[in-house]
Image: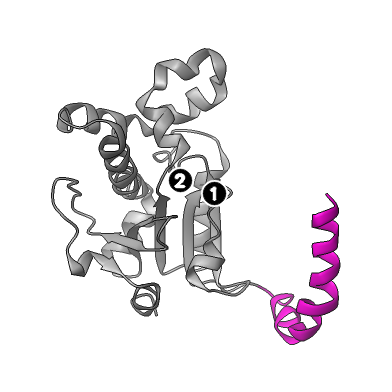
Amino acid sequence: MRKLTEGVREFQTRYFNSHREMFEQLSQGQRPRILFITCCDSRIDPNLITQTQPGELFIMRNIGNIVPPYRATNGGEGAAIEYAVQALGIKDIIVCGHSHCGAMKGLLQLGDLAEEMPLVYDWLKYAEGTRLLLKHNYKGHEGEDLLNAAIEENVLIQLENLRTYPIIHSKIYSGQLNLHAWVYKIETGEIFVYGVERCNIQAEHGEDAVYALEKVQTTLH
């Protein structure tokens, strides 16, 4: 806790003072351009990896960057999505997974979680589409290959789940909203950007599939 309290003091005396005008503007309201859906994992910092300032991203986090289908749960995810698109006028939604994801490791061994972490077990049931896709299409993969497939396919499944929301479907149809699937590699800092149609771990990632951070950002302006 001492590190946190010292950090707060540092923020107030240095960063806040040198960015006072920005915070005064933020106090008048928020106008983020992007809904960024990612994992709770402490190693993931959306503002850091995108080099964005407070107010630029509307961030939704949960275990496994999972988007339950429309009305599948009474949790806050649906409300956050609806608010972002309807009230804030978000134009882009990014679902960002990451390497070494503990949630996807758990999904691959779902039965083991039932007794140890029953709430995590129940939550990961919302990623059943990912689990079944892996079961039926990645039978020859195991270990890190299977985990990477789970991470990659999961972000694409979540885009499909997003489309079950009436407001999302309507905005996409009218050209007012775009969906994006990213995977952040913790160990290299790379962002992999996937086409919304499909993902195939058996195919090597081409040069057009891997973007430097600066190039990724320019596609969202």
Of the residues shown, which amino acid type is indicated by label 2? Answer: Asn
Report the Cα–Cα distance between label 2 and label 1: 6 Å
Q: Residue at x 55, y 19 (%)?
A: 118
Magenta-colored span: 1-29
Q: Residues within 10 Å of mark 1 (few under 14, many from 20)?
A: some
User: What residue is shown with label 1?
Assistant: 61
Assign a secondary structure to mark 2.
Answer: loop
Q: Who is closer to the viewer here, 200 or 196?
A: 200
Left or right: residue 70 versus residue 51 is: left
* The image quarter in which residue 177 lies: bottom left
Can you give x and y, in whole percent of width and height, for residue 83 in the image? 54, 57
133 vs 185, left or right, is left
In the image, farthest residue toward the top: 115
Secondary structure beneath label 1: strand
| Residue 116 within the magenta-colored segment of the rendering | no
At a point 49% along the width and 33% down the height, the residue shown is: 73
